[in-house]
Amino acid sequence: MANGGIAYLNENIRYAYEAPVSMYLFASGRYRKEKEEYRPVLVGLNLLRIKEADYRNFAQSWVKWLQVSEIEATVDEVA
């Protein structure tokens, strides 16, 4: 979640500028590497919208998934 963008949405699924937040929208890019230029090219977006009331359950489930997937071990191996 930390490597993307976060938008705070109101109950009408609009940016919550000076309005109560009802939902969070997490966004991250999907990239492919171009062989000729050796740089990533944006090919799409991953979007996840979560109601504020459901965020705690989502975060707890996400942490459990990270633990089960052993992603910490993978990160340690790379570092």
Image (tube, grey):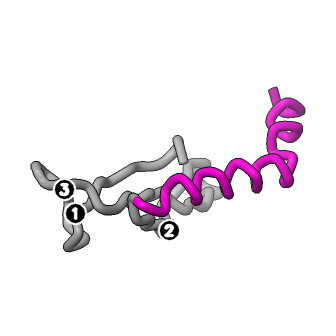
Kind of element beneath mark 3: loop
At which x and y percent is residue 69?
A: 84, 53
- Residue visible at 65% across and 51% down? 60
Q: Is residue 55 above or below residue 46?
A: above
**Magenta segment includes 37:** no
Residue 27 in the image: state x and y as whole percent: 44, 58
For the residue marked with disc 3, what is the amino acid? Answer: Ala
Q: Is residue 41 left or right of residue 24?
A: right
Nearer the observer: mark 1 or 2; the answer is 1
Disc 3 to disc 1, how far (Cα)?
Answer: 5 Å
* Rendered residue at 43%/67% (across/down): 49
Residue type highlighted by circle 1: Asn
Callout 1 secondary element: loop
Between circles 2 and 3, the one closer to the viewer is: 3
Dot 1 alpha-carbon crowd within 10 angstroms: few under 14, some 14 to 19, many 20 or more:
some
Q: Residue at x 76, y 49 (%)?
A: 66
Q: Whole-percent x and y of residue 45?
A: 47, 66
State the residue position of label 3: 16
Residue identified by numbered label 2? 43
User: Mark 2: which amino acid?
Assistant: Val
Earlier residue among tags 3 and 1: 1
Callout 2: SS: strand
- First along the sequence among labels 1 and 2: 1
Residue 54 vs residue 75, the one in the foreground? 54
Query: What label does residue 20 carry, if any?
Result: none
Left or right side of 65 for 62:
left
Q: Is residue 58 above or below residue 74?
A: below
Outermost residue on the left side: it is 18
Q: Which residues are magenta?
A: 53-79
Within 10 angstroms of label 3, few (less than 14), some, or many (20 or more) residues? some
> What is the distance, in whole Å, between disc 2 and disc 3 at their CAs?
28 Å
Mark 1 = which residue?
10
